[in-house]
Each structure stands twice: as structure tokens, then as C-alpha cells.
Amino acid sequence: MTSEYLSCDIIEYGFDAQYDAINLCCRISGNNCNEPFHIIPNYKGEKINWNDFFQKKQEIRNIHQNGEIFKPCNGCLYLRKEAWDNSNYIRTVNINNWIKCNADCIYCNRSSLKKHKEYKILPIFKDIIKHDFLKAGGPITISGGEPSIIREFKPLLELFLKNNLNNIKVLTNAIKYDKTIEKGLKKGNVNILVSTDSGTRETFTKIKRTDKHNQVWKNIKKYAQYAKYSELVKTKFIIIPAINDNKEEILEFIKQNLNSGIKYAEIDIEISWFYTHKQNRTHFDEIYELYQYAVEKAQEVGIFLEAKDRMVLFLQNIENS
Ligand code: SF4
Ligand code: SF4
């Protein structure tokens, strides 16, 4: 039975595995984004009771069916009115439970979690597939730490490919080249996003705290050569004020994309900076000018640069002011 109300794909079909909980959502765009809602708190990889899981999801769905908004979702840009099918299955997946990484980005919390023991995600997905809860369509987002250095990443991705799942998005730093990602790109079922946040070796090393700029762009180029469609390999530039917020760096980023055969890239604003400055609006004009410059320069060389997440909220703020 379908019914039309304000909701989102995550409320309806989401599964968000974090390192310490199964959460409702990982998309940091609601007004209460600093308080993630736990479907299963203190999670360490135990077998999941799916009746309980879907019951908790239904309680949130009920709030929306009654014309209200679940508190953590207030103000979220992903809310939309649609005829949702009111069924219990999983389609929008976020795998973010791993911690290990071969970089140490200045904006990332993973290095502070090193003492935390990672739980295994592969048995959970075998169980989800056994119960026939996982539907194709995605997005299935696999992130970190760095997936390509995690032992269960390869069998997990193979499992998804074997079950003909598509729209599998791997957030990789591309320091290591991965043959299973290559296989998924060739098939057209996998897409990758590499956030270099820089175009020069110096800035890359400052942000990622590892000197792998050349290796990363070499791997991006190789992935792009194998991808079935050019939109399957994207790069990203997260503006980090006082670190990479200058036109020279943006130009170098665009040049690297051009040299690597990349046609699609994303632009965003660093999360913690955005949420600590969004009220006082410091540097808003400079960021807006930089954004416009980046879009214009990318367009000149045939690269589509898309605003994402915080940048979308930022542009809405500018338009409404
Ligand atoms: S915060 Fe947004 S994306 Fe996340 S569940 Fe709520 S409405 Fe959906
Ligand atoms: S590559 Fe990703 S997981 Fe690794 S340190 Fe950077 S942001 Fe964190």
C-alpha cells in the first residue's frame, strides 16, 4: 500500500552501520545533525533482530505519516513528499564501521578511534541477503576508514556484485589501487568518489598528512580509464578555510581532473567549520566567490562541478539572505 507524505529514502529503506551503533542516518544535513539517532545503540556486530529493527523504523515512519517530522530530521534537505510504499526492506545503505586508514586527514575523527575494535560487517550483509531484505537501486555507500585496506572489503563487494546490486558508491582515498573496485567500475555497478581537496602536492600533504598526491592522481586516472561511464569516477574538493580556500588550489585541482580524464567533480565545505560558522557568517562572501570561480573554471574545460551537502545548505542560506 502506498501513501503520500514527507519522508526520505533513509527513513523508509535505510541501514546505517557506524563503528559503535546502527544509526538511522549519516547524512549531516538536518538541524540536529550532531545527535545521531541510534536504531541499535552500543552495537558491536551482534546478530540483528530484524523485527525489532523494522519496528523502530516504523515508529519513525508513523510520525511522518501523521504529518509531523521526526525531530532529528527537522530542516533536512532530503525530505520530500512522495508516495512511499510502506514496506520493510533495505535499499539505502551506509557502511561506515571500519576505522583503519592509510591517510590521516586533518578533518577526520578516525585517528582518535584507533583503540576501538572494528566489528565484522560481512556476516550482517550475508544475513540481510539471506532474509531477502536487500533490494537493488541503492545507493550503497561504503566508506571508512579506507575500504581498500580492509580485509572484508573485497568479499563484501564481490557479494554485492554477485547479487547484482548496483549504485554501489565507494568513498576511497585512492592511495591504494583496488582490483575489485576496477571490476565494479568496468561492470558499471560501482562508482567511486575521491576527495583530494587539493590540486598540488603541498596542499594534499598538508590535508591528508601523507605524501601520496602523485600516486592518488595516477590511480584516479587508471580507475577513470576502466570505468564503463565517465560519471562513475568523481573527485571532490572540500573547502577548508585557511587551508585550501584559494583560487590557485582550485585551478590546480581542475587541471589534475582534466589530466586524469575526470568529467564530474563535487565541491563541499568542511563540516565542523560550516556548523561553527553558519550563524555568524564569517567568510561567507569569500566562499561564495570561490565557489562561483570553481564552477566557472571547471565549466570552461568541460568538467561538471556539483555542489554537495554543506555547500547546498550554504547556497540556500545565501539565496535566502
Ligand atoms: S536527517 Fe534527513 S536524510 Fe537523514 S533520515 Fe532524516 S530526513 Fe532522512
Ligand atoms: S581518507 Fe577518509 S577515513 Fe581516511 S583519514 Fe581521510 S577522511 Fe578519514
Image: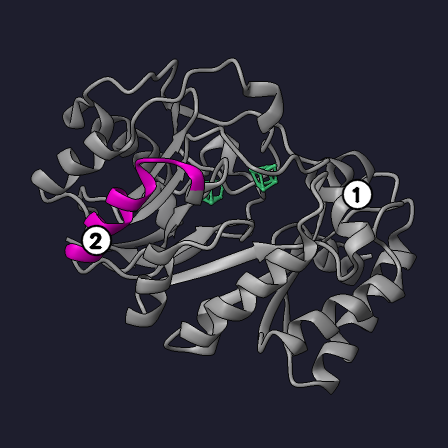
Q: At 49% from the left edge and 72% from the top edge, which residue is drawn?
A: 224
Q: Is residue 160 left or right of residue 307?
A: left
Q: Is mark 1 within 8 Å of ligand 2?
A: no
- In the picture, the disc for residue 206 is 1
Q: Position of residue 269 (x, y in %)?
A: 72, 50
Which numbered mark, 2 or 1, is in the foreground of this view? 1
Question: Which type of secondary structure does the marked residue at label 2 adopt?
Answer: loop
Q: Position of residue 244 (x, y in %)?
A: 83, 52
Q: Which residue is mark 2?
A: 85
Instruction: Say which amino acid is labelled 2.
Output: Asp
Who is closer to the viewer here, 150 or 295? 150
Q: At 34% from the left edge and 61% from the top edge, which residue is drawn?
A: 167
Q: Is residue 288 above or below residue 259?
A: above
Who is closer to the viewer here, 316 or 213? 213
Q: Are marks 2 and 1 in contact (CB under 8 Å)?
A: no
Quadrant location of ligand 2? top right
Q: Is residue 125 left or right of residue 318?
A: left
Q: Is residue 154 magenta?
A: yes
Q: Which residues are magenta?
A: 149-162
Q: Main secondary structure of the magenta part?
A: helix
Q: At 34% from the left edge and 39% from the top edge, which residue is drawn?
A: 66
Instruction: Say which amino acid is labelled 1.
Output: Lys
